[in-house]
Amino acid sequence: MKRSSILLIANFLLIAALAGCSVKQQYQADRLITKGLKDYYKDYFPIGVAVGPQTLKGDEAELLLREFNSITAENAMKMGPIHPRENEYFWRDADSIVNFAQKHGLRVRGHNLLWHEQAPEWMFKDSQGNQVSRDVLLARLKDHIYTVVKRYKGKIYAWDVVNEAIDDNPDDFLRKTKWLEIIGEDFIAKAFQFAHEADPDALLFYNDYNTERPEKRDRIYTLLKQLVDAKVPIHGVGLQAHWSIFEPTEKELREAIEKYSSLGLQIHFTEVDMSVYPWEKERRAKRSGENDQLTPELEQKQIAQYKMVFDIFREYRKHITSVTFWNVSDRYTWLDTYPVSGRKNYPLLFDTKLERKKAYWEVVNFKK
Ligand code: HXH
């Protein structure tokens, strides 16, 4: 072999080795970065995450403490789990979450005090199994809210007081629930009143989903305006942000933020995730062609969507006072079972190995 071709090959091998090495070094450097989302966003808003007791140990807890400075109980504080029978509260899981937050200096958003889902059956029934009266249900609601809110007074700074009270049908207003049926329309104002009495320092939120879809947005706005005009103690609106790579558009997101904040309410994005599938309640089965993988095409769309929404979040920092993700990583997300059970989803900023995804870097690489 000629000397020149040996040199050429040697040169090629060297370049290949260096390239491989720099990719690896970059990767290792990334892993060593101890800064987290909360640090990149320290001049903007707290960054939270929904957790269960199982999130508070091992590698997920390590990630949690590196990246987040706020937590929410995914399920542990909901009425059913925390108040399973009339004279019985189950505090263990909620307490462990609040204790973890206290120990590590994290904020806690409480979720939630009144919802039509995960509400215990006993709440609406008397000992004979008949539906209770308005007065009985109001007394039970007050007792529940007082007990839970007072237990964590000073440790939970904001509560989702009422969750998802607006109907999905654009022609209806309030959702047809037991709360509405038994108490009447003022169940919402009452819940806020009770929460405010129990902890006058807590910030109180109305929380809902699909809040950027104009037909839902306008009805939520109407409800919020009624509450504000009636001087109900409400301080903000929780926009769940269960989004997808298909929605919302930038225009829809801007319009929603501007419309809600025009009422003088704070905005918390309370349950952020970015499904790689369309978000439709009618859709209960996989579509043909879907193979449950985060393909490069889906990944690219997700990166662009995450970048767009965080660009907007920073732009509206004056109105946005918290952003919380609904679960830690793609290792476990409620969207693996909802709305289609057994379909893997990849909606978060950390992958199944808890590594930062490309979308993560889009979210944290910004000019101040
Ligand atoms: C949230 N609901 C809850 O706030 C949270 O407590 C829970 O842990 C997870 C998600 C989101 C949700 C909203 C609607 C829904 C299912 C879940 O069903 C529909 C989906 C699309 C359109 C209409 C209804």
Image: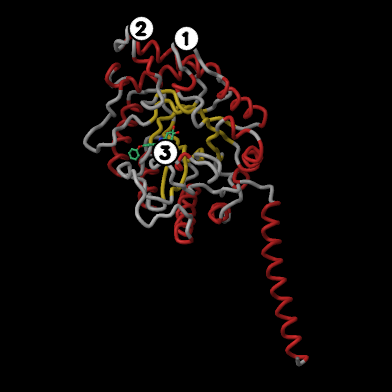
Dot 2 alpha-carbon crowd within 10 angstroms: few under 14, some 14 to 19, many 20 or more: few
* Res 125 → quadrant: top left
Dot 3 alpha-carbon crowd within 10 angstroms: few under 14, some 14 to 19, many 20 or more: many
Dot 1 alpha-carbon crowd within 10 angstroms: few under 14, some 14 to 19, many 20 or more: few
Q: Which mark is residue 87?
A: 1
Give the mark nearer the N terminus: 1 vs 2: 1
The image shows residue 327 at horizontal and vertical percentages of 52, 39
Q: Which mark is residue 127?
A: 2
Residue appearing at x 71%, y 76% in the figure: 15
Q: Amino acid at mark 3?
A: Leu
Residue 262 in the image: above or below residue 20: above
Mark 3 touches mark 1? (CB < 8 Å): no
Pointer 1 residue Cβ closer than 8 Å to ligand 1:
no
The image shows residue 55 at horizontal and vertical percentages of 59, 35
The image shows residue 2 at horizontal and vertical percentages of 76, 92
Give the mark nearer the N terminus: 3 vs 1: 1
User: What residue is disc 3 on?
Assistant: 239
Figure quadrant of the N terminus: bottom right
Separation of residues labelled 2 and 3 (CA atoms): 38 Å
Residue 22 in the image: above or below residue 282: below
